[in-house]
Image (spheres, rainbow, N blue to C red):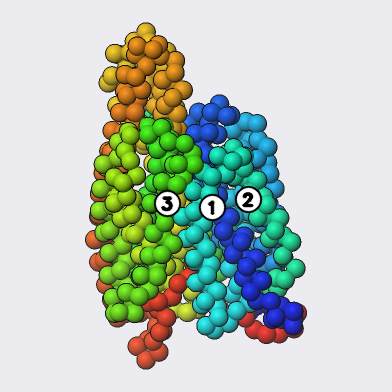
Amino acid sequence: MNVFAPDRAVRQRPRLILLAVCLAVLMVPVSLSGISVALPAIGQSLHAGIVPLQWSVNAYSVSAASFVLATGSLADIVGRRRMFVAGTALFGLSSLVCALATNIYLLDSARALAGLGAAAIITAGTAVVATTFQGPARNRAFAMTGVVVGAGLALGPTTSGWLIALMGWRGIFLSQLLIAVVVLCMVRVLPESHDVEAERVDWAGTSTFTSSLFVLTVAVAEGPQLGWTSPAMLGLVVVFALLLAGFVLAERRQDRPMFDLSLFTQPRFVALCLLPVVFAFGFVGLVVLIPSYLIGANGESSSTAGLTMLLLTGPVLVVPLLAARLLQWGVSTRVLLAGSLLVTTLGVAWLTVIHPGIGWLVLLGPMLTVGIGQGLSSGLMDGAAVSSVEPSRAGMAAGMFNTMRLAGEAVAIAAMGGVLVSLIQGRLSHGIGAFSGQTSGTAHSLANKVASGNISGPAASVPGPHHAAFTHFLSGGYTDAMHIMLWAIAAFCGVATVVVYVLLAERPAARAVPPSDPDPDADSAVVALPVEPEPEQVSR
């Protein structure tokens, strides 16, 4: 039961409420995708290696994924507006610290706090929308938040590239601080609500889930540094398995678990939770890693790289409209979602044409194809996940879906970064001997710098006659590693296409809505964040 009594002022300002929530939600994807074009500049400015530099992305994504369920539970207890304000304030303060950071470790710590703020913004903002709008207006409000999430992810690299050109990399975080301040000035229009049945936060589940996700991320990110088969790596895998088992046990003992594992017995729900994980590798990971390649191997500026990324992210802004039209024309959700994976597979495989000096015309086809694949499903996955279970468990399903999405992004970004370093190191180790005496760098140290988009730095230390050859050697190793990783991602997406298509097959026994009471919005729902039941209009 929700306690919520909107006063007359609130009823008259629903658009302001939605604007405040959308502005705050906009910061969450922008902060993830936008930092991608800044990594080379941050690395050079703060003299950071690839591992701590990559953690400026990992810390944010891991923190957001770890606490999205806990902040949702806490918001039900202390109040959704209070949690929204706290999350926005924490995000803004963290952005200020990032803008003033003088070393990479302070930046990483602030990014972790920003991730916690992002989790609170997502969950509390969703609840505010759900308790403000009813009926068709609620569907439209959630559709708007979905557009904002897609726009933030799509425009993050481009806007960040422009900010870097105007103000340097610190301008990215100052812009986020400005948005947070604007949102905080608008919070008076937000209604307050809470769940009177909510008693406490599932701290056992939260702590074990957070710890297990952190350990897994450390393992995949630090693999090249520790050695993939080293005792330390095996120890991390064992610790992860134990923590994951502890999380499962903790959730099974809860009367009201925040993560209902029984939903994973439903094939359709499993398929829908698999989709964002696959796209984390096939799209989000590329959004983070490709700008470093364009800056390092292609010699582009941050602003040019950000503009080039529009080829990949731009379709996410418009293709969901095409997907909605295809649904109206009778194309099933199953075909659209599996088809989106197939298109992504083809685009990622096509992207292996990437090479130093490549122009945007050559990148146009493969990057647009990947973006179209993501766009075809971005407006459908959330609504399909919610409608795949009975209405009483819709909020739980949406929370689990968002957790899988954020956790998948955290692991994908860390894993792709770690694997890329290993692949570059392997390619460089075969030819580094030809430059013996010309450079003091080892294959391992060079791989760390190259993977962060810094080729000009190591190449500058080589004397003039060998400078061009060494630069070609480094960029060639980077390119070969990217090709191997792209083929592996394409293979993963291809297998997932078949799996998702099979799991989405209609099973009468698994229908969430009886045939006599169909849900007309089941295939057309566009929901980016959890949906809650209608609030009861009672006095506070």
Percent of width and height locating residue 187: 72, 65
Labels 2 and 3: the sequence-earlier one: 2
Report the Cα–Cα distance between label 2 and label 3: 20 Å
Name the residue nearer the viewer: 297 or 119.
297
Q: Which residue is mark 1?
A: 30
Q: Earlier in the sequence, mark 1 or mark 3?
A: 1
Q: Disc 2 and disc 1: Cα gap in Å?
A: 9 Å
Residue shown at the point (28%, 19%) measured from the top left: 431
Horizontal side of 19 relative to 472 (left or right) equals: right
> Is residue 288 visible in the rendered structure shown here?
yes
Q: Position of residue 163 (x, y in %)?
A: 57, 44
Contact between labelled residues 3 and 2, with CB atoms less than 8 Å apart: no
From the image, state whether disc 2 or disc 3 is nearer to you.
3
Quick one: SS at disc 1?
Answer: helix
Q: Three-letter amino acid code at disc 1? A: Val
SS at mark 3 in the image? helix
Circles 1 and 3 in contact, beta carbons < 8 Å: no
Quarter of the picture containing the N terminus is bottom right
Label 2, on which residue? 176
